[in-house]
Image: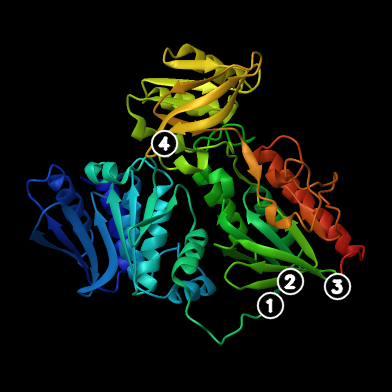
Amino acid sequence: MLDTSLKTQVTEIFSTLENDYCLDIYASKHHESYTELMHLLEDVASCSDKITLKETESDGLLFHVLKNNAPTGISFRGVPNGHEFTSLLLAVLNSDGKGKNFPDEYIIKRIKGLKGSIRLTTYVSLTCTNCPDIVQAFNLMAILNPVISHEMVDGAINQEEVDALKLQGVPAVFADGELIHVGRGELGELLTKLETRYGMADTAEETPQRAYDVIVLGGGPAGSAAAIYSARKGLKVAVLAERIGGQVKETVGIENLIATPQTTGEALANNLKRHMEAYPIDLLEHRSVARVELVDGQKVIHVNGGEVFTTPALIIATGASWRKLNVPGESEYIGRRVAFCPHCDGPFYQSKHVAVVGGGNSGIEAAIDLAGICSKVTVLEFMDELKADKVLQEKAQSLPNIEIILSVQTTEVVGNGEKVTGIKVKERKTGQEYVKELDGIFVQIGLSPNSTVFKDIVQTNRLGEIEVDVHCRTNIPGIYAAGDVATTPYKQIIIAMGEGAKAALSAFDDRIRGSLQ
């Protein structure tokens, strides 16, 4: 099942294993995916004499990862190929204490502090690009804390179970049988949810405040540029981010980054991290800011989980997140046929009729992608014309199963209590309202700045963007903002990079002129 080249790579990856691992299989030989699973696991086991297989006849299709014959807490119910093949490899590597995805000591301490018996299940699609992040995060937690167990479930193989749970979006995470998360997520966000639900072990140890010359909030293009430019000035720099790469990681193809004719969001995010690692920058991932205080000119940053950081120069580059419709029914049906990622959730809508709300680049790109899966795609645009690039509009208009409706306002998501059945829209010119019956809704109306936590500190506009001058300075001395979170026009990767560099240079200029304390 694995070609020769991939086997060679896996053999190299597993060459440093120190412990013995067993893939403990419980499966029925009559299962339609039995042969596929066995070929995959046999190939993986052939890449290291530290990995063996054990098989027990059973119903279904399941295997556990054992380390030195003891449970690791990790299980896979399905065939972990596609995007989840990496999750299988990391399950073994991480169990051996290896892998570049290990968090820093403070995050590890928080994971080990989770209380109770925690049984986690994540339903995935093998075509989903967001699912591996969730699976790998929970697998890592299971390895680090013995009270946690995690099972990955392939929704396609276990379709009856998915239908019974009425799932229409992945990844979908259940904690002891209760749905706690749907869609993209990061280790820090998931950890906070578990801490809130299960509690943390008490510790008498206080976390000391850490001081830096410059602290950058956010690890996307703007934040990365700000950190690199600051570090090159010889300053002590920290980056606090939920994930390095930020929103750009969700971009499949990038073709307008000058001097880079084509790349992917994942590749760009990896390069941003690699570039920052070339400098003495403290990269502190999986952090979300709880609040910021101003104390005698110092900016005091409180992070969820208890950490505290101080700096005279704070650069906010927290980016933006998918904007919601904020209409009745939307929140109720998120994960039940209201979706935001066509790449992850599109396969659920094979031969179905869906709506894409939004006629910008992201909306028309989503419509084009979905047209290859769905029987019909209806694009609903509020304005009198599409905002997408002409080349995208021409492609969409050339596809027979894409319908474009202009000058309509979405007023309600309609459902039957279990799933979406339609969308209510109002014609802006006539005021007429009607319900368009369909099977799913993809929301693609742009991004909302991640500025909520800063609104009591710095000035923002009606859209929530942090107001900055041409030097990226906010109304508070020593606080700067760059990228999609700020009022800078045109939310583009290349512009964000330039604005991040500008914010760092402004902070350095203020420092040498003595205007920072």
Kind of residue indicated by mark 3: Asp
At 68% from the left and 43% from the top, the residue drawn is 484
Q: In this orientation, which residue lies closer to the viewer: 332 or 217?
A: 332
Q: Is residue 402 above or below residue 23?
A: above
At 51% from the left and 82% from the top, the residue drawn is 202
Task: Give the residue number, with chain letter if any, for mark 4.
Answer: 337
The quadrant of the rendering that contains the C terminus is bottom right
Mark sitting on residue 296: 3
Task: Give the residue number, with chain letter if any, for mark 1.
Answer: 209
Task: Give the residue number, with chain letter if any, for mark 2.
Answer: 310
Circle 4 or circle 2, nearest the eye: 4
Q: CA distance from mark 2 to mark 1?
A: 7 Å
- Mark toward the start of the polypeptide (4 vs 1): 1
| Residue 278 visible somewhere in the drawing | no
Q: Secondary structure at mark 2?
A: strand
At 15% from the left and 59% from the top, the residue drawn is 25
Circle 4 or circle 1, nearest the eye: 4
Q: CA distance from mark 4 to mark 2?
A: 43 Å
Q: Is residue 278 above or below residue 161?
A: below
Q: Are marks 2 and 1 in contact (CB under 8 Å)?
A: yes
Kind of residue indicated by mark 4: Arg
Q: In this orientation, which residue lies closer to the viewer: 317 or 94?
A: 317
